[in-house]
Amino acid sequence: QVQLVESGGGLVQPGGSLTLSCAVSGLVLSAHDMSWYRQAPGQERELVATISSTGDDTNYADSVKGRFTISRDNAKNTVALKINSLNSEDTAVYYCKAQHIVYSILEYWGRGTQVTVSS
């Protein structure tokens, strides 16, 4: 059974930092591109960062470039998202997604972790 479990969210003050983690089980992580999405209240889910299966390539939404860093450790079956200089617009539920590099129809989602930026 494939499982993606996000953690690391919480209440953070503006300007603060945090690191989200996605623990993956039940699949070969090195055969999947990994992404982080977020969904703010009343808004559509938004792609914020993607990392290739090998970790060689990363891409970010324009809105988070320079503040977000995605990384992965295939040996530990984890993917991380480091977020710096948090602001209120970063308040959202953050989701981790795995997508097979060959059979792209195969994708798996976690249940999300809440990040709230407030003073």
Image: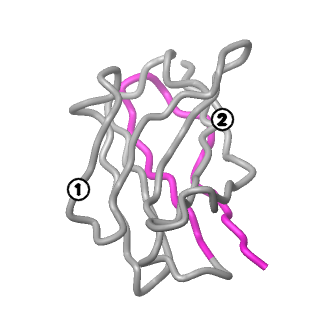
Tell me which amino acid carries mark 2: Val
- The majority secondary structure of the magenta stretch comes to strand
Q: Residue furthest right?
A: 1
Instruction: Indicate whether 12 appears above or below 91.
Output: below
**Residue range (magenta):** 1-24
101 vs 25, left or right, is: left
Residue 43: x %, y % from top left: 66, 15
Instruction: Indicate whether 66 appears above or below 53.
Output: above
Disc 1 secondary structure class: loop
Residue 61: x %, y % from top left: 35, 29
Say which residue appears at 28% left-offset and 34% top-offset.
67
Residue 115: x %, y % from top left: 60, 35
Instruction: Tell me if mark 2 has few (under 14), some (14-19) or many (20+) residues whose alpha carbon lies within 10 angstroms of its own.
Output: some
Residue carrying label 1: 57
Q: Nearer the viewer, residue 78 or 105?
A: 105
Q: Residue furthest bottom?
A: 75
Of the numbered discs 2 and 1, the one sitting upstream in the chain is: 1
Instruction: Indicate whether 78 appears above or below 6.
Output: below
Q: Is residue 96 magenta?
A: no
5 vs 90, left or right, is: right
Q: Nearer the viewer, residue 68 or 54?
A: 54
Tell me which amino acid carries mark 1: Asp
- Determine the CA span between mark 2 and mark 1: 24 Å
Residue carrying label 2: 93
